[in-house]
Image (cartoon, rainbow, N blue to C red):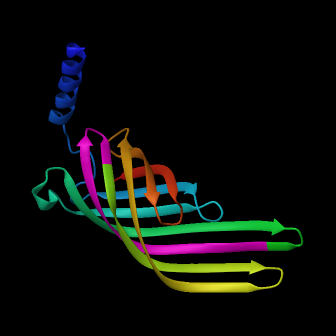
Amino acid sequence: MKKVYLLLLAAFLMLNLSVQSQGLEKGDFGLNVGIGLGYRGFPIEVSGTYGIVDDLFNVDGLTLSVGGYLGVSMFHTSYYWVSYSGVRVLPAVRVLAHYTFFDKLEVFAGPAAGFVIDRTTSNYDSDNYFGLYGSIAAGAKYYFTDNFGVYAETGYSIGYFMVGATFKF
C-alpha cells in the first residue's frame, strides 16, 4: 500500500513539474462556440476572449482576459389550446481568469455584465423584456492541439451547462 501512495505522489509531482502554458496567454484570442441546457429551449452561445495580463497576482499560468459573449435561446411549447414561443438574447462583456493546471488543460471563471432581450408570445398575449444582466461562469478547456479544443462551462448565462469547441489564435 505504501508503494501505491508513493507512486501516486510521484505522478502528482511530475504533473505539477510539467506545467506548460498551453492555455490562453497575453495577446492570444480565443473563440468558443457551444450548445447546452437552459431555462427554455435549446441555447447556443458564441464568445471571444483576449488575454490582457499574464501571471496575474504573480501566479504563474494565471491569465486575465476580456471579451464578448452572445447567447441565443429559442423555444416553442403547447399546452392544450395555448401555444407559447419565445426568443432570449444575451449580449454581454466577460472578464475571465484562466489558469493552466498542466499541459492542455485550462480552467476559467469570471463575471459577465450585459443585457437581456426577451420576447415571449402566446395565442392570447405577448411580452417583451429588456433589462440589465449579470452572471458568473466557470469551466474548463482541453486543447487537442495548440489551436483547437473542447470546453464545458456552467453558470448563469443563456444555459446552465454548455459544451462546445474552442479555438485559439
Residue at the limit of the structure toward the front, as seen here: 1
Magenta residues, dominant SS class: strand
The foreground one among 27 and 97 is: 97
Residue 100 covered by magenta stretch: yes
On the rendered structure, is 22 left or right of 118?
left
Depicted 147 relative to depicted 25: above or below: above
Magenta stretch holds residue 57: no
Is 133 in front, or is 149? 133
Report x, y in % for residue 97: 27, 60
> Observer-nearest residue: 16 or 64?
16
Q: Return the x and y of residue 146 as percentages of the image width and height.
A: 31, 43
Quadrant where the C terminus sits is bottom left
- Please give the name of the residue rendered at 85% of the width and 74% of the height, measured from the top-left corner: 82
- Say which quarter of the image contains residue 144: top left
Q: Is residue 21 left or right of residue 70?
A: left
Residue 158 percent coordinates (x, y): 53, 66
User: Relative to residue 41, is residue 143 depicted above or below?
Assistant: above
Picture residue at 27% right of the left edge, 48% below the top = 23
Query: In this image, 111 relative to 27: left or right?
Result: right
Residue at image point 43% right, 63% down: 47
Query: Residue lying farthest right?
Result: 81
Q: Quadrant of the N terminus?
A: top left
| Chain part drawn in magenta | 84-106
